[in-house]
Image: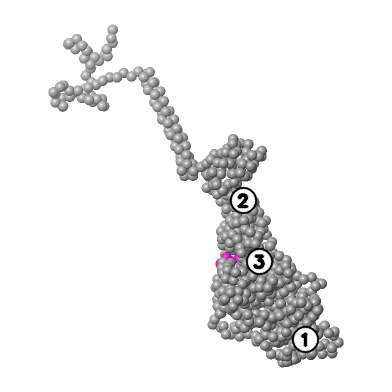
């Protein structure tokens, strides 16, 4: 029996009538029911009843949970595959197959000399006085392998050769055939080469970071910088001298060089070297107040990046390694020691009227005046005869002491391992002949930097400085040098050097407004069988400005050949002095030295000295006899010249001195 709700009642037709519940709103979403053809307002809502059981609700809840879980899992997989896709895009497009990242450990210039020290991955940079980079280490990679991990070593070597053609396949085959677990295959790989090899995917091949020394300016200051080997150790030049400093400290090594001046000197040297077909050349610029070397050029030179491939003759540094007879540039030393010791005065005259013959050797003058010369004339006309007599006046013992005090018997002391030792006669052989020849720069060999340092001491007030390749700090204390002569001697020598340029063989070096002073020097080179004719070393050493000496400029040509422009002469006044003048005109403004033209006449007057100075009233010493024709001087080998005048012999006899004493007094 079916139970009915209590509020239902039977209808007349025998059915049941639902209770009257009043007007009800149709369920949401139900469509109104209406009779076919009836108007829309006559429609009646249609109702359906759906019975949902508890199991159905449980199943629906379970499905909802499963759906949530699937959505969460799908989101996780989407994120995962998105990350993988991003990583693949980075590895193949953005940064394709980069094996590892290495930080670029460069050491930039700074003004702090107290940068923290400690183990560094790369050598410190080398910069010039204006922080222009001269040497820097760049990161590279080294290729090595473990042959035991390789399947086919021969094929691996071949594939590496195809990837990087510069590699040596035969060498790699040989190394990979060994039983060692670590073999080097290549060094200094570029980043592109590293990526190319890494893309091959050869088992057992790996990389390790390294550094390559690079010299951005190539040939500029190559002899000064030197070079470093593949392991980063200095092997020449500054790189070798300061090897430990460059490896252990991060602060850049600041040199005294000025690359602008270096470029000018090299340009002028290369021009005259080509013009006169010289086999080599050398140029130096030094601050005579501090000893700082601003320029050091030696030709031929080489690209510092190819130090190992450069031939020995190109790596030879003529400025400090080459030992040359200085020639007439040494007459400045002869005059300085005579004046400083009081052995001679500027008004003394010296016999240059006849050659000096010693055995089979003859001392003579180039385009001599064939008369007695005053001391200023000896320098202006570069008289070998006059310089020989001045040296005899001073004497061998004092000459040796002077040159030793000027540092001519020792290494020059600059921070370059290539600095050579002068070639000096022994004490036993230093007799009258050696005294005379050394007086005009023969019989002794020194480096060009020795000449520059000695000339700087002559001009800067008499202070011998140690040349340095390091820049001095702006707040550094004054340079402590060694006084080697009186200030008054230096003042006189500055006037004499200016006289050489205004009235002597140094005229081509004069530059208006800069009051250049200097000395020419031409010396024959020594060969296996004595001096070689027509093989000269022609040099000019100069100081500017002479009224306030600041810089020394040295220009030298090795075996130049004269041409039509020089009348066939290859002497220093013809080939080296003009180049020095051009260098001074170009570098002086760079160094902040402007031409002094407004008071040029007054400055020149302060530097003037007559070629034939008058003897001051009340001056001590015998009066000079009148100039007369003198017989040639002769001497036995190793002995002293014969007496030069009857008056000198009479003076010697009256004083009881032996005859050879009078023979050594060649001045008037």
Q: Nearer the viewer, residue 229 or 353?
A: 353
Q: Quadrant of the image for the N terminus? A: top left
Residue 120: x %, y % from top left: 63, 52
Of marks 1 and 3, the one in the foreground: 1
Lower position in the chain sequence, tag 2 or tag 1: 2
Lower position in the chain sequence, tag 1 or tag 3: 3
Q: Considering the numbered disc 3 on the image, is that residue within a helix, a strand or a loop?
A: loop
Mark 2–mark 1 distance (CA, rounded to whole Å): 72 Å
Q: Name the mark on residue 644.
A: 1
Mark 1–mark 3 distance (CA, rounded to whole Å): 40 Å
- What residue do we see at 70% from left, 68% from top? 323
Over which residues does the magenta segment extend?
A: 256-260
- What residue do we see at 60% from left, 69% from top? 277
Quick check: 619 above or below 6?
below
Q: Considering the numbered disc 2 on the image, is that residue within a helix, a strand or a loop?
A: loop
Q: Is residue 67 magenta?
A: no
Quick check: 197 above or below 469?
above
Mark 2–mark 3 distance (CA, rounded to whole Å): 34 Å
Quick check: 280 above or below 549?
above
- Are there few (<14), some (14-19), or many (20+) residues within 10 Å of tag 2? some
Q: Which residue is mark 3?
A: 318
Q: Name the mark on residue 552.
A: none
Q: Are marks 2 and 1 in contact (CB under 8 Å)?
A: no
């Amino acid at each position: 029996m079916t139970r009915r709700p209590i509020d239902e009642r039977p209808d007349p037709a025998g059915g049941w009538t639902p209770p009257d519940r009043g007007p009800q709103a149709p369920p949401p979403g139900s469509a109104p029911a209406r009779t076919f053809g009836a108007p829309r307002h006559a429609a009646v809502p249609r109702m359906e009843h759906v019975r949902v059981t508890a199991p159905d609700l449980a199943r629906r809840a379970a499905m909802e949970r499963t759906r949530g879980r699937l959505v969460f899992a799908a989101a996780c997989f989407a994120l995962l595959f998105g990350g993988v896709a991003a990583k693949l895009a980075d590895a193949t497009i953005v940064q394709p197959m980069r094996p590892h990242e290495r930080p670029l450990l460069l050491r930039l210039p700074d003004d702090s000399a107290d940068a923290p020290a400690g183990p560094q991955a790369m050598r410190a940079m080398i910069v010039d006085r204006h922080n222009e980079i001269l040497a820097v280490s760049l990161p590279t990679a080294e290729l090595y392998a473990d042959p035991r991990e390789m399947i086919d070593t021969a094929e691996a070597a071949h594939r590496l050769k195809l990837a990087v053609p510069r590699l040596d396949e035969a060498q790699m085959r040989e190394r990979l055939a060994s039983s060692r677990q670590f073999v080097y295959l290549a060094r200094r790989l570029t980043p592109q080469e590293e990526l190319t090899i890494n893309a091959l995917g050869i088992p057992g091949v790996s990389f390790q970071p390294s550094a390559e020394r690079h010299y951005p300016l190539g040939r500029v200051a190559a002899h000064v910088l030197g070079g470093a080997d593949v392991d980063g150790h200095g092997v020449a030049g500054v790189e070798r001298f300061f090897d430990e400093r460059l490896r252990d400290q991060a602060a850049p090594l600041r040199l005294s060089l000025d690359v602008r001046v270096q470029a000018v000197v090299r340009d002028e040297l290369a021009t005259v070297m080509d013009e006169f077909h010289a086999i080599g050349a050398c140029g130096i610029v030094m601050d005579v107040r501090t000893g700082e070397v601003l320029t050091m050029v030696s030709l031929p030179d080489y690209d510092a990046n190819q130090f190992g491939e450069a031939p020995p003759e190109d790596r030879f540094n003529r400025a400090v390694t080459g030992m040359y007879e200085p020639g007439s540039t040494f007459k400045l030393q002869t005059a300085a020691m005579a004046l400083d010791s009081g052995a001679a005065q500027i008004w003394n005259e010296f016999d240059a009227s006849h050659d000096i013959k010693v055995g089979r050797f003859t001392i003579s003058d180039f385009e001599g005046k064939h008369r007695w010369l005053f001391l200023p004339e000896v320098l202006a006309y570069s008289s070998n005869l006059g310089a020989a007599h001045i040296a005899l006046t001073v004497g061998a013992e004092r000459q040796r002491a002077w040159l030793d005090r000027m540092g001519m018997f020792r290494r020059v002391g600059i921070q370059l391992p290539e600095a050579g030792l002068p070639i000096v006669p022994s004490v036993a052989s230093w007799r009258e002949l050696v005294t005379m020849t050394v007086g005009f720069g023969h019989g002794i060999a020194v480096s060009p930097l020795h000449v520059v340092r000695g000339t700087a001491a002559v001009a800067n007030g008499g202070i011998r400085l140690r040349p340095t390749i390091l820049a001095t700090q702006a707040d550094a204390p004054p340079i402590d040098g060694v006084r080697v002569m009186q200030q008054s001697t230096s003042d006189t020598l500055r006037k004499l050097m200016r006289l050489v340029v205004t009235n002597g063989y140094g005229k081509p070096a004069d530059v208006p407004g800069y009051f250049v002073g200097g000395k020419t020097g031409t010396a024959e080179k020594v060969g296996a069988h004595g001096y070689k004719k027509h093989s000269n070393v022609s040099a000019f050493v100069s100081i500017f400005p002479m009224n306030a000496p600041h810089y020394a400029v040295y220009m030298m040509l090795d075996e130049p050949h004269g041409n039509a422009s020089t009348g066939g002469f290859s002497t220093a006044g013809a080939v080296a002095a003009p180049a020095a003048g051009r260098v001074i005109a170009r570098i002086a403004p760079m160094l902040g030295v402007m031409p002094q033209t407004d008071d040029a006449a007054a400055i020149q007057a302060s530097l003037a000295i007559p070629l034939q100075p008058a003897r001051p009233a009340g001056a001590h010493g015998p009066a000079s006899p009148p100039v007369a024709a003198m017989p040639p001087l002769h001497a036995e080998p190793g002995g002293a010249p014969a007496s030069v005048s009857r008056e000198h012999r009479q003076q010697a006899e009256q004083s009881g001195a032996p005859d050879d004493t009078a023979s050594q007094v060649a001045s008037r």
